[in-house]
Image (cartoon, helix red, strand yellow):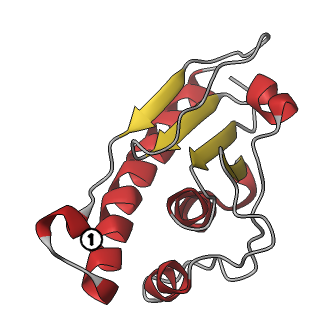
Amino acid sequence: MSARPVVLFVCRSNRGKSQMAEALLRRVAGESVEVHSAGTEPALGKDPNAESVASLAEVGADMSAGTVEGVDDEVLRRADRVVVLGTAARLVPVDGMRTAIEVWETDEPSARGIEGAERMALIRDDIATRVEALWAELRGAVRAQ
């Protein structure tokens, strides 16, 4: 584990869940972590999902300036944690990775007929809970070194 852990969050488009996780980890960890997000099928040239941006603003996190990016093999190799959010993205390990790929099967309220701001708040809260647990785990690992 690096003294300043490197975390990569991945989703399919990099317009929503992975950028939400990145912004939420920045909110709780600040500069204590190097955090990235990416998409396996990035929606290049598009802005972050407006509903995701608005939902994060409600809890004091900001992803409004985020840019859509694809997965960078070098970041995959340097990462202490690689987390795929949801089941839509498929990430293939690359040679030299230091960690396994984790998959967070995040809540998908639309499967229950929940849409709009309510849907996004449920997704945000699910990701926030997981991010806070990840940060507690990373802090503990860094202190133990």
Image label count: 1
Task: Tell me the amino acid under the disc marked 1.
Answer: Leu
| Residue at mark 1 | 122
| Dot 1 crowding, Cα within 10 Å, few <14, some 14–19, many 20+ | some
Q: Quadrant of residue 3?
A: top right
Secondary structure under tag 1 reads: helix
Q: Give the vertical position of 96 relative to 123 (above or below).
A: above
Q: Nearer the viewer, residue 108 or 9?
A: 108
**4 vs 52, nearest the viewer:** 52
Quadrant that contains the C terminus: top right
Instruction: Give percent across and percent down for residue 141.
Output: 55, 27
Give the position of the N terminus as an image quadrant.
Answer: top right
Q: Is residue 125 above or below residue 82?
A: below
Instruction: Work out which residue is located at the far left of the displayed protein and give it.
Output: 112
Seen as rendered, the residue at the extreme top is 95
Front-lying residue, 100 or 114? 114
The residue positioned 63% from the left and 59% from the top of the image is 14
Task: In the rendered view, tell whether residue 97 sits above or below residue 2.
Answer: above
- Compared across the picture, whether 100 is left or right of 114 comes to right
